[in-house]
Image (cartoon, rainbow, N blue to C red):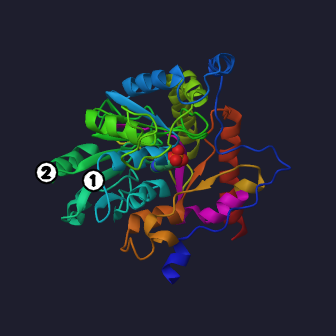
Amino acid sequence: MKHKRIILPAPEPYLNRRKKIIPVSAPLFDGNELAYLTRCIKSGWISSLGSYVEEFEERFSAYCGAGWGVACSSGTAALHLVLAAAGVGRGDEVIMPAFTMISTANAVAYQGAKPVLVDVEPDTFTIRPDKIEGKITKRTRAIIAVHIYGHPADIDPIKRIARKYKLLLIEDAAEAHGARYKGKPAGSLAAAACFSFYGNKIITTGEGGMVVTGNKKIYRRAAYLRDLAFSSARHFWHKELGFNYRMSNLQAAVGLAQLERVDKLVAIKRDNARRYTALLKDIAGIGLPPERPWAKNVYWMYAVTVEKEFGISKDRLRARLAQNGIDTRNFFIPINLQPIYAGICRGNFPVAEELCRKGFYLPSGFNLKKDDIAFIVNTIREARLCWWTRR
Ligand SMILES: Cc1ncc(COP(=O)(O)O)c(C=O)c1O
């Protein structure tokens, strides 16, 4: 218990609202968003029956190099739909990284299955392929590889394991629109992939998500379960338990307009990352986000670690940034340390826990200016200097 207390981040620091606030993320709506929304309103097609939903599904799945898309209400719903469509259920086990957003584990739990955790690689923060086989049992049905903070997981060795044990491989690409693995787009790397379009994502629909897949069976079942499992032969006739996970035409209208500019949006994220890296690289004790040679990292969030050498802890640095109006976020708290999974997901995941202890992300919004980045980096530099001169 003492161990856990040390790992868990401090309560959120006070954000000084008397200063100019630099938010952790902000969307960019400088395309056809308003025009498409206006068309929805003027035509009256605002529910999931409007034509933007299908168009968004077709275009986004094509962008990912996948055959089909099932638009839905969130990334969490997308994960749940894939598992339900594949028949993962009570008593089954699903392997996933310990270091991920709660949604990855929750989607498994919604189906009555058990998340089985694997530690992550220190240099990509994604699941360790060499630790997966040791976690496979007779009950294992699927592996979820999460492309964390925009960096793809090392998918080839995971694919080999999935093939060997006949397991369903799913990408959790909620944070990785436009990312690439050995030149191939996120969304085309496994049997199915799940994206989020929440307000802080690379393309957004406010709230929303999508399953993309090249597997016709998964596609058909996911589409059917998303819409309350309505029978096609007879309306209001339900033989199975479905969900209302539909996406509205209004959301899809925004998504489509965002998708038209996805290359620009990815380029902004990568430019911001380049600027941060150039300024931060000579500050001792700040660990910079990874980009392995085989990866295109889309830097959904610019993720850094605070090492001992820096002099002050991550929590103190975040507090200092917050005093200056700079909003930041802690890294995810590993699933094994979440109270709702205590007792279910036991084990030691030293890398995931270490990342939680020392990692946070800096403002990474589409509205971030060159000067903002310079100000943020200077504030980090000063925090360190202050500490060293006071010693
Ligand atoms: C890795 C990961 N998986 C799943 C999700 C769930 O997406 P949503 O918030 O749209 O439900 C998120 C959301 O941020 C995420 O970061």
Residue under label 1: 142
State the residue at coordinates (67%, 64%).
316
State the residue at coordinates (44%, 43%).
78
Q: Residue 278: x, y in percent? A: 54, 39
Is tag 2's residue or tag 1's residue first in the polypeptide sequence?
1
Residue lying furthest right:
18
Which of labels 2 and 1 is toward the front? 1
Image quadrant for the C terminus? Answer: bottom right
**Amino acid at dot 2:** Lys
**Amino acid at dot 1:** Ala
Above-or-below relation of 69 to 362:
above
State the residue at coordinates (27%, 32%).
216
Residue 118 visible? The answer is no
- Report, in whole angstroms, how far the alpha carbon at label 2 lies from the one at label 1: 12 Å
Horizontally, residue 157 falls left or right of residue 365, namely left
Horizontally, residue 187 falls left or right of residue 302, namely left
Residue 300 covered by magenta stretch:
yes
Q: Residues within 10 Å of mark 1 (few under 14, many from 20)?
A: many
Q: Which residues are magenta?
A: 294-320
Q: Quadrant of residue 225?
A: top left
Secondary element at tag 2: helix
- Give the number of the disc on residue 164: 2
Q: Residue 317: x, y in percent? A: 66, 60
Q: Nearer the viewer, residue 345 or 323?
A: 345
Residue 364 covered by magenta stretch:
no
